[in-house]
Amino acid sequence: MTTGKAFMGLFACSIILLVAYSVLGKEERVMGAEWSTQEVPLISREVFFGNPDKMAPQLSLDGKYLTYVAPYEDVGNIWIRTVGAEDDRPLTKDDGRGIWSYQWAYNSKQVIYRQDREGDDNHRLFSVDINTGEVKLLTPQDAEDGHRIMARIFSGIPERPDELVIGLNLRDPGVHDAYLLNVRTGELELAAQGERGITLYPGWLVDWKLNVRGYVRSELDGSLTLMLREGNDCEFEPVITWDSEDSMTSQPIGFTPDNRGLYMFDSRNRNTAALVEWYPETGERRILAANPLYDARFQTTNPATHEVDAVAIAGERFEWRGLNDDMSSDLERLQAQTDGDIWIYHRSLDDRVWLVFAVSDNRPAAYYTYQRETGEMELLFYMVEAMAGQPLVPMEPISFAARDGLTIHGYLSLPYNWEAPGPMVLNVHGGPWTRDYWGLNPEVQWLANRGYAVLQVNYRGSAGYGKEFLNAGNREWGGMMQDDLTDAVNWAIAEGIADPERIAIYGMSYGGYAVLAGVTSTPELYACGVDMFGPSSLITHLANLPPYQLNRRHHWDLRVGKLPRYAEGEKAGEVKPDDEWTDDERAEMEFLRSRSPLYFSDNMRAPLLIAQGANDQRVTQSESDQMVEAIRARGVPVEYVVYENEGHGFYRPENRLDFYRRAEKFLAEHLGGRYEE
């Protein structure tokens, strides 16, 4: 469990990088009419993909200081200023991939941040002293057997300001045990030992007295079991089982203020996930918020009372609902001042001051301070000042019927001065168990500014539309999930939007897999493709999952396909050699092979650009290497770039800008769009 502060600090850092750059104030919106009768200026790639000017603000728990992330010597670092002053200074001076995720310690003397090594996903915890600037490594780097250690923060409370409950896979690379960490001394104390099957998300459940009280265990059939205990001296007992159909739309959030109940997202006995308050002792279960079409997806917690007091329903746009009169009033007051979507990014410990972030589709982002008592809002800073006044395009929700009748939702963004039909980029989201959201997406705006229609599709298997829609993607990688993308392209052609001779498919991670699947299964549909770290073979991808994902291996078995593994003994979990496969296992391997683009490279016609991080643990470099080798053997053009100091995503600005330069030139060559020299 995370506190409301920690949740927003960690979650919002990631979502603002995906759906970003809005500003409160209807009067500041850039309307498209002024660009409809003149040539649209080319917006620099640096504006879209350089480092943001400032982002991720947080207040110290004593209210004296404000921190935020901004470049120091072109690398993202934590900065600090005294509230009410203009004494901004860098608190950290990292010169690598930057620091993007942090939170204040409750002692208001230290800031805690996570950082991996060149993108290897094995995050370590550091503290920085706000007075001396001393940086201290708080967690071990490597275990005795040599495996690298990944740290996660789960909870802290103001009553114990020097302590946090964290997770470390110190004992077993695939299991995160719970530890009590003293952030001043670095002392670690084991709080609870995990078991094989414990899930990394949501991780350990910690109550408001900093007692480790529960966790979620993944079962062989793909279901999840919620394990709870009364206190530190008690045994964990199973209290809830979410069947496999509910396991992706249900999870505990945290304890109620009295530590007797739990807040949860729960889809049992319904299609969509509802926000639920549940008490194990009595079985009392109360639905706090729900929608018949869309899942309840995110929440915010009052840091003073520990109550979950607002929830977001993720439809075409985010709809925040207050769960009490005061919160409803504040949300209405905020929403009245913007036609975008509101995020309460950070809340002061006494909940009197909020830092507010808003999401719109075609204007730059700004952070504001919001005083709850007066309703006054004051500009804090812009995320990217150079976005202001630029010709950013609207993002419109769309839907269509797939070939089997299932309704598929998505978004369409058209360039100004659009002449249909024209060139189009199908931008496929990763995950795949996430989704695209409405808002300003830098990639979408970049592509539209270069002259391309941009189509985003929440294909079956995407999150947010209820469990039936999500489970419709089970075992459909390269199958009906890919058909939804094909149907989306055909819809755009039939609607007169896309020129059938100038369509590209573009994506990262699962989206990269969809690129490879698209150019091998429907080669006639795409003029070119751009793949960022996409799996090329489901067989090798599943065999090389990182240790922290192995506890959800049964989830992969159910939703993608199952490798033949030893069930018990010293080799338990290892993949069997082919001479030991049963007939059923052999059939399953044939199924996985049939959904792996690597084995269908003979079908390719379209040129490809493939980009990969050398240290990627989620999709290893071998996935891209083997695909490039197969493509080149066929004589099909492929441009391949590997960034040696990156992982699952390109964080260094020089690498990020290099990739988008390559992608822009590649698309211009094959679709005829604009290119910034």
Image: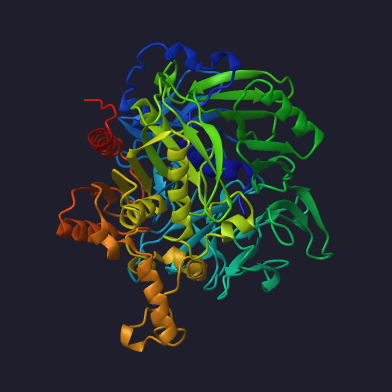
- Residue depicted at 71% across the width and 30% down the height: 331
Residue 226 against residue 583 in the figure, above or below: above
Residue 144 vs residue 412, the one in the foreground: 412
Please say whether residue 171 is visible from this viewpoint: yes
Residue 279 vs residue 91, the one in the foreground: 279
320 relative to 655 in the view: left or right = right
Please say whether residue 186 is visible from this viewpoint: no
Quadrant of the image occupied by residue 415: top left
Residue 71, given in percent of the width and then of the height, sits at: 36, 30
20 relative to 673 in the view: left or right = right
Residue 403 vs residue 588, the one in the foreground: 403
Residue 82, given in percent of the width and then of the height, sits at: 52, 24
Residue 196, given in percent of the width and then of the height, sits at: 52, 73
Residue 618, given in percent of the width and then of the height, sits at: 38, 58
Mark count: 0
- Residue depicted at 65% across the width and 64% down the height: 214
Residue 376 against residue 573 in the figure, above or below: above
Residue 391 vs residue 358, the one in the foreground: 391
Report the coloring of the rendering.
Answer: rainbow
301 relative to 570 in the view: left or right = right
From the image, which quarter does the N terminus lie in?
Answer: bottom right
From the image, which quarter does the C terminus lie in?
Answer: top left
